[in-house]
């Protein structure tokens, strides 16, 4: 008997743009804006992005309580709106930042300790990606895309320009 093909084929589509609300963008330093642009560039890479095929752009707005992500089609019509409460990611962000800070301190524990911390950072990133994949289910993203969403949301919430070692696995423009 022939093997049935996977019903859900990963769809790689180019997302034309990701826009951050003007109040957030204008209130940020140039280095922070550059961090966001790098994270956005990685997220919209058409060779990497897995998202619903009718998506064209994404708008992100932040408030004190949550982050709102609005996915739009080519005609500008809203396809999906997902609100991610900050507390849904707070523990992941705190653990990730704590791990990065421990790595930056470079305690005299040596290479083995640094490798363990790097692995811990990857594990937190994976867990956060799984959580975001659930929260962003209407966007139909895969786990690697969810991990890149976490990177973007992390640097929107935390000034990562002040964290040494946060970019251990990032490609730069």
Image (spheres, rainbow, N blue to C red):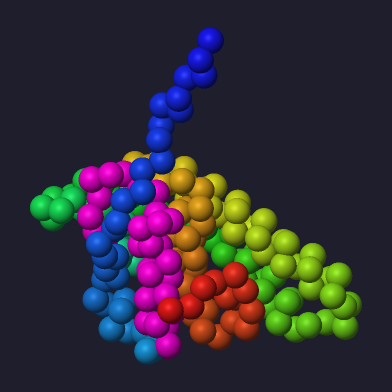
Query: Is residue 18 among the parts visible in the rendering?
Result: yes
Above or below — where is 128 with respect to 110? above
Q: Identify the image quadrant of the C terminus.
A: bottom left
Q: Is residue 31 above or below residue 36?
A: below
Read off the magenta span.
Answer: 31-58
In magenta stretch: residue 127:
no
Is residue 130 shown left or right of residue 78?
right
Task: Determine the residue positioned at 78% across, 83% down.
Answer: 106
Identify the residue at the far left of this view.
75
Q: Is residue 157 visible?
A: no
**Where in the figure is residue 86, as x and y percent of width and height?**
45, 60
170 displayed left or right of 34: right
Q: Residue at x 86, y 70 (%)?
A: 112
Q: Percent from the top left, x then y, of residue 151?
A: 49, 65
- How many numbered marks, from 0 up? 0
Position of 26 with respect to 106 (left or right) is left
As for residue 38 lying within the magenta part, the answer is yes
* Residue nearest the observer in this picture, 7 or 18: 7
Residue 101 versus residue 146 in the image, above or below: below
Q: Residue at (51%, 57%) from the top-left corner? A: 147
* Residue nearer the viewer, 41 or 97: 41
| Residue at the extreme bottom of the image, as rendered | 30
């Amino acid at each position: 008997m022939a093997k049935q093909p996977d019903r859900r084929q990963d769809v790689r589509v180019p997302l034309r743009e990701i826009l951050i609300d003007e109040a957030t963008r204008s209130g940020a330093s140039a280095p922070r804006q550059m961090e966001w642009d790098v994270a956005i560039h990685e997220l919209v890479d058409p060779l990497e992005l897995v998202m619903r095929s009718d998506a064209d752009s994404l708008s992100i707005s932040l408030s004190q309580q949550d982050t709102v992500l609005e996915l739009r089609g080519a005609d500008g019509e809203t396809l999906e709106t997902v609100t991610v409460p900050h507390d849904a990611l707070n523990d992941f962000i705190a653990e990730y930042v704590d791990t990065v800070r421990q790595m930056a301190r470079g305690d005299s524990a040596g290479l083995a300790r640094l490798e363990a911390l790097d692995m811990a950072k990857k594990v937190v990133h994976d867990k956060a990606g799984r959580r975001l994949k659930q929260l962003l289910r209407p966007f139909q993203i895969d786990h690697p895309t969810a991990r890149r969403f976490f990177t973007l949301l992390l640097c929107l919430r935390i000034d990562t320009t002040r964290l040494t070692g946060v970019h251990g696995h990032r490609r730069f423009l």
